[in-house]
Image (tube, rainbow, N blue to C red):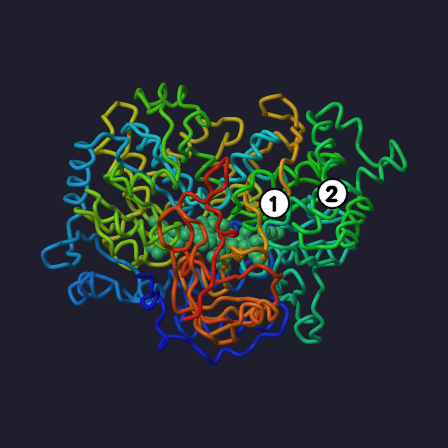
Amino acid sequence: MTSNDRSHSATKQDPNTPHYTHPAGGWGSLEGVARIFGQEKPTPVALKILAKLNKPGGAMCSSCAWAKPAKPGKFEFCENGAKATLWELTNKRVGPNFFATHSVSDLKTWHDHDLEAAGRLTHPMRYDPDQDKYMPVDWAEAFAEIGKELRAMDPDEAVFYASGHAGLEAAYLYALMARGYGTNNLPQSSNMCHETTSVNLKSYIGVPVGTCTLEDFEHCDAMFFFGQNTGTNSPRFLHQLKAAVERGCKIVTFNPIREKGLLEFTDPQSPVQMTLGSPTKISNKYYQLRPGGDIAVIAGMIKHVLAAENAAPGTVLDQSFIETHTTGVADMITQIHSMQWDEIETHSGLTRAMIEEAADIYLASQNVVAIYGMGLTQHVNGWLNLGMLVNLLLLRGNIGRLGAGISPVRGHSNVQGQRTVGIGENPDLFPLDLQEEMFGLPLARDKGMNIVHAGQGVIDGKVKATISLGGNLLRAMPDIERLEHSWGQQRLSVHIATKLNRSHLVPGRISYILPCLGRTDMDRQKGVPQVTTMEDSLSHIYASLGQAKPPSAELRSELAIVAGIAKQIVPATPALKWDEWTDNYDLVRDLIAKTWPDEFHDMNGRMSQPGGFYRGNAARDRVWHTQSGLAEFTAPTTLSALGRESGNTGPNFSYTLITLRSNDQFNTTIYGYSDRLRGLSGSRMVVLMNHAEIARAGLKEGQTITLDCDIDDGIRRHVTGLKVTAFDLPDGCVAGYYPELNPLVPLQYHEKKSGTPAYKGTPVRITAG
Ligand SMILES: Nc1nc2c(c(=O)[nH]1)N[C@H]1C(S)=C(S)[C@@H](COP(=O)(O)OP(=O)(O)OC[C@H]3O[C@@H](n4cnc5c(=O)[nH]c(N)nc54)[C@H](O)[C@@H]3O)O[C@H]1N2
Ligand SMILES: Nc1nc2c(c(=O)[nH]1)N[C@H]1C(S)=C(S)[C@@H](COP(=O)(O)OP(=O)(O)OC[C@H]3O[C@@H](n4cnc5c(=O)[nH]c(N)nc54)[C@H](O)[C@@H]3O)O[C@H]1N2
Ligand SMILES: [Mo]
């Protein structure tokens, strides 16, 4: 059964949201904010928090990881940031009374939206299987039982997951706890998004993160956007894009969907633009390539660049950079020459003329920045998507100088930072010798599980406990129906969370929900307000101060909860001062500074400076921490990122499925049923296809269909009850929403080198009914 009725409650949907034809930003976004304001009735404190959001002395937004400029705007938040903030500041509460009224089986019939909309969790709760209800429990009892269970296990049977919300301090202690306990099973939400970046950029240019800072966006002549939806997922970035366009920078976008935010933007903070209503055109050129077609596009662009160099030798490529700083160019060029334009056109879905036009903009630009998101990372050959992008940049020395570089736009507000301070399954990336010495404690050295391994471990019964520091894995992961089936067989599941979600409703034999403070809550320890810190997409670190009265006196900070568990499972040593660290987060920052002195020295002194402090980036300085000690070109071996022959021909007719986010969701947190920027609303149970495909498939708009995953491994994966909806998409692909379509993605269908699920390229078949 894959009926998604439970995630689709028609009565709660809003069929009246108007069709949206306006630019990103502008009145529409203020309306969106107003709607949330209407729903959540913001208090004066909430308004004060919003006014200080992303500014020194305020809280850092819990939504995306975009940079917080040193000179902030009057309001340095976007529609989505306001939604995330007010969602957390809701005055609704989910406490013992709520759980006494609703059994877990009852709650399982609720929609994702309704579970979270019920309000903030207020008390630690333990699942009672006899009553099928969560019952209140004492913190000390909870820690004691969790400790007892974990101590009785082989540490490698436990998984310590982190979603990118928690600050650097809690993250540092979380990783220390897992390794001190005995495992590197430290998967993180980036395993589902930018792990492709962490693994492959590290191998090509020696850093697991992007090389750009805000300054580069002020000095580049062109930006090339691949598969990142700024208007929905990092809207504050639109301000830098608008400024760039206004000084003449060219923006070239490759995306199968014409995303509003990359087409035009009205600055809601500009009275002139708001009144006169002439939006800024963002993309100079917009190419609707086929999903998985980026390798082919970039191969074509490189062909054109090489042809230009051939026509005027010594004038196009940055030969001295290539000679001094790179390796592998000859092999790369040989492979590019072997690729034919007709194949490039087939795989990309674009014409040679279009690709050459884009390449001409690249050639005419002195300084180029490449920006990307899930459109490149969530594919089987994501490694080559990134390899090709790096190739393109390296040919003209576009990494490691002002106005140039590569810029992955990260997801959660501290997803990058959690990795920086130790959360990760690969122990080789962290200074464990130093940490062993600092804490007088042996730390686990065997490689741990990433999210795919952990999921498989749960299915195989090898994983017996999952501790989740945030997140909603049973909605966010691939293959969620198979996972859900096995999840409850675990001995222990622990959720450190702010709001109730579906993953909490699949309890292990022993199951806890431990409620924590959110980003906007005042975190006082021993009467002293504590700040936490986070790292943005551009490697800057900021202090965040919550100012709202916490929803309940029972709540603990994430750091306090981690320390509470750690004391139970990590052997005590004199240097492990869990209680002192809980009382004073400055001490944890001193540990971070001691562990990574080059990047984090004087962290306490620097964390409050406007614009955050920069932790540096070797590739930006043209120092290459790769295997060869040089920046590495990648020779392409295929033209498709899909990892299979794609297309809508032949007897086994299958479509490529793109899973999308709307601007009314933050991951599995569904705020509402509008996808305003795409002109869609009312239902998330839709399949988008172009008119011609609808006709070719013999379907009609509005018809109900079933999608089946077209990978045959003996397991049927399907989702029913989806409505055919006409939408401007390339031939051969369909699109729908995440997480509703996650049952379709096989766990083993992932990026080859990093394990990032291939959520943007799953092959599917359609059947009517
Ligand atoms: N409001 C809001 N903000 C968010 C989030 C949210 O859910 N809501 N999530 C946060 C998180 S955790 C993350 S990781 C980021 C994700 O932010 P993004 O990286 O923007 O991710 P997506 O929206 O999943 O997909 C991005 C784009 O990829 C395009 N695309 C799909 N396939 C291809 C392809 O093969 N090639 C190309 N070139 N493009 C393709 C899609 O059309 C889409 O526009 O956003 C963060 N910010
Ligand atoms: N098909 C498909 N699937 C995808 C994607 C896709 O593009 N397509 N994207 C993937 C990506 S990029 C990601 S990152 C994942 C993420 O997906 P999720 O796991 O949904 O990410 P979160 O937003 O962290 O999880 C939401 C939960 O976090 C908890 N929470 C919120 N704030 C806090 C806090 O401050 N502290 C703590 N401890 N808990 C908090 C709340 O209880 C909330 O219910 O989904 C992935 N899944
Ligand atoms: Mo993400």
Residue type, mark 2 in image: Gln
Badge 1 density bin: few <14, some 14–19, many ≥20, Cα 10 Å: many
Q: Is residue 431 above or below residue 102?
A: above
Residue found farthest to the left: 130
All told, the count of numbered labels is: 2
Image quadrant assignment for residue 538: top right
**Left or right of 489 in this view: 259:** right
Residue 415, given in percent of the width and then of the height, sits at 46, 44
Badge 2 density bin: few <14, some 14–19, many ≥20, Cα 10 Å: few
**Left or right of 450 in this view: 372:** right
Residue found farthest to the bottom: 16
Residue type, mark 1 in image: Ser
2 vs 1, front mark: 2
Q: Earlier in the sequence, mark 2 or mark 1?
A: 2
Residue 340 tag number? 2
Residue found farthest to the right: 312
The answer to whether any part of residue 406 appears in the image is: yes
Where does label 1 land, which residue?
640
Q: Nearer the viewer, residue 548 or 484?
A: 484
Residue 267, given in percent of the width and then of the height, sits at 64, 65
**What secondary structure is found at the residue carrying circle 2?**
loop
Residue 271, given in percent of the width and then of the height, sits at 66, 71
Q: Is residue 161 above or below residue 445?
A: below
Tell me the quarter of the image containing the C terminus. bottom left
Image quadrant assignment for residue 575: top left
Residue at point 79%, 32% (across, down): 318
Residue at point 58%, 67% (across, down): 693
The answer to whether any part of residue 60 appears in the image is: no
